[in-house]
Image (tube, grey):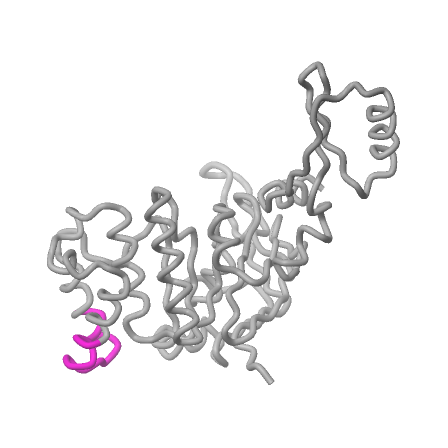
Amino acid sequence: MTETVIIAEQLTKIFKRKQGFFGKVVKKKAVSDLSFEVKAGEIVAFIGPNGGGKSTTIKMLTSILYPSSGNASVLGFIPWKNREKLVRQIGVIFGQKSQLYYHLSPMDSYCVSAAAYNLSSREAKSRIHELAEQFEIEDCLNLPVKNLSLGQRMRCELIASLLHRPSVLFLDEPTLGLDIEAKHLFRSFLLKQAQKEGTTVFLTSHDVGDIESLCQRILLINHGKLLLDSPLQNLKEKYGAGQVLCVEKKSGKIEEISLQNKEKISELQKILSAQTFSNVFVRSIDLETVIASIYRK
C-alpha cells in the first residue's frame, strides 16, 4: 500500500486587513475548507487562476504560514508545529524567489546549505557533482549567480532544493520566465530525478507544458476551494471531447464540431449534404483549452 505523504483536512486561511488608518477590518478567505491527499511518488499539478489560493496553500504546507483552521500533515509532520524537522525532508522552489546568494557562486550557496542540513563535506561534494553533471551545469558552479542566465540559475536552484535528497518537492511556478529550451531541460531533469529517487512533487504552474510533461494528476482550485481532482489522462475525456471535427467551408470559415454534441452533428449533416465545404479534418483538443473551459464553468 502506497504511503500518503501530504494530507490537507478542511484547511482554511483567512487574511485580515484594515481599510484606511481608522477603517474597519476586512477579512478575505484565501483558502476555504480544502481537503486532499497525495501519495508517495506522485507528481501532482496544483492549478487554478491567479488569486485562487495556490501559493497560500503551499506556504501552509511548507510551514511559512499558519492556517486559520483545519489540519495538514506532510511526511507525518504538522508543518506549523514541526517546522525544523519538516524542512530537513522537503525541498521548495518559488519561481520568483531565489535561495542562492546573488553575488556569490552557486557552490558557495551549496556549502552553506550542506552545513545547515548537516551533510559532511564528502557527502555534499559527491551530491553536488552528481546533480551538476546530470543537469549539465558543472561549468557554472563557481560563477557568480548574478552572471548566470535565467535557465542556468533555475537549474542551480533545483540542485539547491535536491541537495539533501528531499522526500517531497514543492514547486511554485518554477519555469516562470524561462525560454522554451530552458523549460524543456528543466522539466526533463526534474522528471528524471523524481523517477530516480521516488520524490513526490507538488507543482503549481500556469504553463500547461509543465503539467503535461511532468504530472499524472491534477488538483484544480479556485476561490480557495477544490473544484477538481482527476488523473491527467482522464481530464480531456471528462471535460472535453478529446477531438473535434473541423469543417472548412468554401467561404473560408472553419466550423468546429464536437462529436458528442448532437445539435452540431445535425449541422454537420446539412453542411455535408449541401456540399458547401472545401476540407474536413480532425483536431485534438489541447489541455490548455480544456482547463480554460473548466475555469469558465
Q: Is residue 75 above or below residue 183?
A: below
| Residue 120 is a magenta residue | yes
Left-right relation of 49 to 167: right
Q: Main secondary structure of the magenta part?
A: helix
Left-right relation of 125 to 246: left
**Extent of the magenta region:** 112-126
- The percent position of residue 156, horizontal first and vertical second, equals 25, 59
Residue found 71% across the figure and 49% down from its top: 239
- The percent position of residue 188, horizontal first and vertical second, equals 38, 59
Q: Is residue 59 above or below residue 116?
A: above
Q: Decide which of 278, 42 is in the foreground and name it.
A: 278
How many numbered marks, from 0 up? 0
Residue found 19% across the figure and 56% down from its top: 101
Left-right relation of 107 to 153: left
- The percent position of residue 98, horizontal first and vertical second, equals 28, 54
Which quadrant holds residue 35?
A: bottom right
Left-right relation of 204 to 281: left
Q: Decide which of 275, 159 is in the foreground and name it.
A: 275
Residue found 15% across the figure and 46% down from its top: 147
Q: Decide which of 156, 264 is in the foreground and name it.
A: 264
Which quadrant holds residue 140?
A: bottom left
Residue found 61% across the figure and 58% down from its top: 232
Q: Decide which of 73, 182 is in the foreground and name it.
A: 182
| Residue 194 is a magenta residue | no
The N terminus lies in quadrant: bottom right
- The percent position of residue 26, horizontal first and vertical second, equals 56, 45
Q: Residue furthest bottom?
A: 1
Q: Is residue 97 above or below residue 296?
A: below
